[in-house]
Image: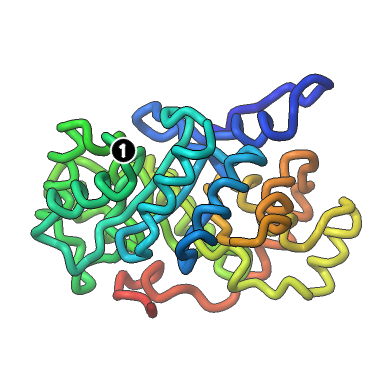
């Protein structure tokens, strides 16, 4: 569950952001807010991660396919934040199925780390669950190269296949998520299995100019984007908004000083329209 903090005087906003976390099934704590780095490149990626760590983020999401692992590792090293205080996720491209060890070792070399906090299968290889690939992630976790392992863009039936064949469920399933994509049955299916849901592109698929969203934001004195991110927190879903804009990175993190009412959460739940195909029928989603 989300760690509750005493918000009385003396607790800095940076500490507040850093300390908000979710407990995974294993007991590992995962910060509930992270910085997504898709499309961030070069010095821009370094600056974005440095800014995020400066304002209190302690969760950075990257991937082999993003081509920025070296910049993420450089920023963590330059930040002065102890490595063990930063939760870093990277991902195995489906095209590297069968080359799991080499891929993770390359990621660790690029990051300059001895381990990652979370390693995900980025997409189901060829649209299939591939328990054999999952088994190799588990082996590398057992060797200490990844603290936790999980998947991304998997459907519930694919999660069940992994457990059926290996006896282990992923710690995390990272999928596209927002009020417009809300599906209570998917959320509850993950919770019954003890799989933490993590939402990427949380601001991409929702209309931030929606009048109803605007009214909720106005009532709280915040932006519509902050309301959407807070909605993730109310549902205990990890959110990883991406940005390289210093002001936006800070704004996205300023979501722990207010709470949505149950009625407001329900209003946002009803934004749901079309579902991502991988959530409902396990087929490979659009890129």
Quick one: 27 or 12, which is closer to the camera? 12
Position of 133 relative to 209 (above/below): above
SS label for mark 1: loop
Q: Which residue is mark 1?
A: 113
- Location of the C terminus by quadrant is bottom left
Q: Is residue 212 above or below residue 18?
A: below
Residue in view at x 28 percent, y 43 percent: 149
Q: Residue at x 41, y 35 (%)?
A: 24
Vertical side of 156 occupied by 5: above or below: above
Q: Residue 194 placed where, x, y %?
A: 38, 40
Rendered image quadrant of residue 88: top left
* Above or below, 107 relative to 7: below
Image coordinates of residue 267 in percent, x first then y, are 74, 62
Q: Answer with left or right where residue 261 lies relative to residue 171.
A: right
Residue at (32%, 65%) from the top-left corner? 65
The percent coordinates of residue 38 (x first, y second) are 46, 64
Front residue (pair 51, 188): 51
Q: Quadrant of residue 192?
A: top left
């Amino acid at each position: 569950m989300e760690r509750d903090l005493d918000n009385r005087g003396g607790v800095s906003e940076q500490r507040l952001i850093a300390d908000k976390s979710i407990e995974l099934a294993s007991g590992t704590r995962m910060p509930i807010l992270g910085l997504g780095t898709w499309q961030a490149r070069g010095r821009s990626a370094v600056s974005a991660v440095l800014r995020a760590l400066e304002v209190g983020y302690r969760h950075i999401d990257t991937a082999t396919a993003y081509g920025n692992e070296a910049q993420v590792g450089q920023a963590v090293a330059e930040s002065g934040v102890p490595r063990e205080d930063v939760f870093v996720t990277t991902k195995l491209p489906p095209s590297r199925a069968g080359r799991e060890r080499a891929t993770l070792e390359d990621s660790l070399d690029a990051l300059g780390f001895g381990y990652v906090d979370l390693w995900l299968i980025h997409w189901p290889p060829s649209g299939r669950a591939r328990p054999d690939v999952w088994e190799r992630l588990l082996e590398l976790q057992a060797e200490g190269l990844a603290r936790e392992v999980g998947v991304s863009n998997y459907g519930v039936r694919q999660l069940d296949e992994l457990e059926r064949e290996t006896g282990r469920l992923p710690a995390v399933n990272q999928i596209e998520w927002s009020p417009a994509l809300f599906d209570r049955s998917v959320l509850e299916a993950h919770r019954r299995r003890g799989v933490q849901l993590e939402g990427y592109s949380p601001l991409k698929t929702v209309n931030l100019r929606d009048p109803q969203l605007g009214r909720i934001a106005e009532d709280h004195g915040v932006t519509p984007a902050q309301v959407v991110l807070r909605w993730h927190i109310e549902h205990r879903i990890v959110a990883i908004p991406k940005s390289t804009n210093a002001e936006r990175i800070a704004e996205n993190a300023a979501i722990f000083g207010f709470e949505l009412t149950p009625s407001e959460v329900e209003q946002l739940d009803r934004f749901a329209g079309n579902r991502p195909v991988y959530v409902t029928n396990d087929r490979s989603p659009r890129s």
